[in-house]
């Protein structure tokens, strides 16, 4: 299910292009995004989709980097806060599965490197 990442990259490209135009950037060399580990976004899919949406555009040679931010969740049952792994969403203290994500759901355009 890559459609989610494709839509995100399409929006990112529009955002980067808008910023490049506003700032008068001639050549965008690299775009860096931060993705929370609990966002459901797959970094490898994001990179593949960036290649797809930039193909044939002035951004096709722009490097794309994804930095993953760890997600912190809180157990609703016992109140424990912990760094959560999307593969294993269980409270390490009580084994509870009712969790509230506190961080790790974000997707942010962190940096644009340009000439």
Image: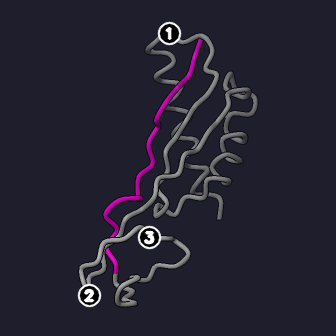
Residue 103 on the magenta segment = yes
Q: Residues within 10 Å of mark 3 (few under 14, many from 20)?
A: many
Marks 2/3: CA–CA distance: 15 Å
Q: Which one is earlier in the sequence, the residue at label 2 or at label 3?
A: 2
Marks 1/3: CA–CA distance: 41 Å
Q: Which quadrant is the C terminus positioned in?
A: top right
- The residue positioned 52% from the left and 51% from the top of the image is 68
Residue 105 on the magenta segment = yes
Q: Which one is earlier in the sequence, the residue at label 1 or at label 2?
A: 1
The residue beneath circle 2 is 77
Residue 36: image location, x then y, percent: 46, 55
Magenta segment boundaries in residue numbering: 99-115
Secondary element type, mark 1: loop
Secondary element type, mark 3: strand
Marks 1/2: CA–CA distance: 52 Å
The residue beneath circle 3 is 84
Residue 82: image location, x then y, percent: 36, 71
- The residue positioned 73% from the left and 26% from the top of the image is 61
Residue 27: image location, x then y, percent: 63, 15
| Predominant SS along the magenta part | strand
Q: Residues within 10 Å of mark 1 (few under 14, many from 20)?
A: few
CB contact under 8 Å: marks 2 and 3: no
Residue 35: image location, x then y, percent: 49, 51
Which label was assigned to residue 24?
1
**110 sits to left or right of 58:** left
- Say above or below: 92 vs 74: below
- Say above or below: 8 vs 80: above
Q: Which one is earlier in the sequence, the residue at label 1 or at label 3?
A: 1
């Amino acid at each position: 299910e890559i459609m989610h990442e494709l839509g995100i990259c399409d929006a990112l490209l529009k955002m980067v292009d808008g910023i490049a135009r506003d700032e008068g950037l001639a050549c965008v060399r690299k775009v860096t995004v931060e993705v929370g580990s609990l966002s459901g976004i797959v970094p490898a899919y994001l990179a593949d989709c960036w290649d797809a949406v930039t193909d044939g555009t002035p951004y096709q040679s722009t490097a794309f980097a994804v930095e993953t931010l760890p997600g912190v969740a809180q157990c609703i049952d016992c109140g424990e806060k912990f760094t959560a792994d999307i593969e294993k969403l269980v409270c390490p203290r009580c084994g509870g599965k009712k969790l509230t994500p506190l961080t790790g759901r974000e997707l942010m355009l962190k940096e644009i490197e340009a000439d």
